[in-house]
Image: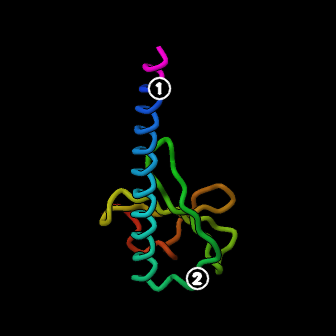
Amino acid sequence: MKKVLVILFIVLLIIGSIFLTVKYFEKRTVERHFDSYLEEHSYQNDILSRETKYDFKMGKFYTRVYFKKYPERTYEYHYFSKERFFGAAYEKGAEIETTEYLKNAKYP
């Protein structure tokens, strides 16, 4: 009985490690894509703060950004692939229509 529990524990530990490793590399990929987006549009110096979060409903990482020019707005960039991502801006919890900081951040 102890042998079975030890084997089960080891298997669960391996599966958990693989899951966390895959999620870590997904997060790094999203961050790299966002960095190249910032570079491409020269937004690096405009950032007040940024964080990469995981959306459990979609099963994907996204980047939340606050720019110096609009600290009250939240910009979210959801990545599906390098060529396909979506950007949206929110102010006071409601989505707003703006093109600033969202160049090419719509589904192609």
- Any magenta on residue 78? no
Residue at image point 46% right, 67% down:
31
* Rendered image quadrant of residue 41: bottom left
Secondary structure beneath disc 2?
helix
Q: Which mark is residue 46?
A: 2
**Disc 1 packing (10 Å; few <14; some 14–19; many ≥20):** few
- Rendered view: 43 above or below 17: below
* Horizontal relation, residue 84 to residue 77: left or right: left
Q: Which residue is mark 1?
A: 6
Residue at image point 39% right, 50% down:
22
State how many labels appear: 2
* Rendered image quadrant of residue 96: bottom right
Mark 1 or mark 2, whichever is nearer to me? 1
**Dividing the image into 4 quarters, which one contains the C terminus?**
bottom left
Which region is colored magenta? 1-5
* Horizontal relation, residue 49 to residue 106: left or right: right
Residue at image point 52% right, 76% down:
100
Residue sitting nearer the eye, 25 or 69: 25
Mark 1 in CB contact with mark 2 (< 8 angstroms)? no
- Rendered view: 101 above or below 16: below
Secondary structure beneath disc 1?
helix
Residue at image point 68% right, 73% down:
71
- Rendered view: 7 above or below 27: above
**Disc 2 packing (10 Å; few <14; some 14–19; many ≥20):** some
Of the residues shown, which amino acid type is indicated by label 2? Asp
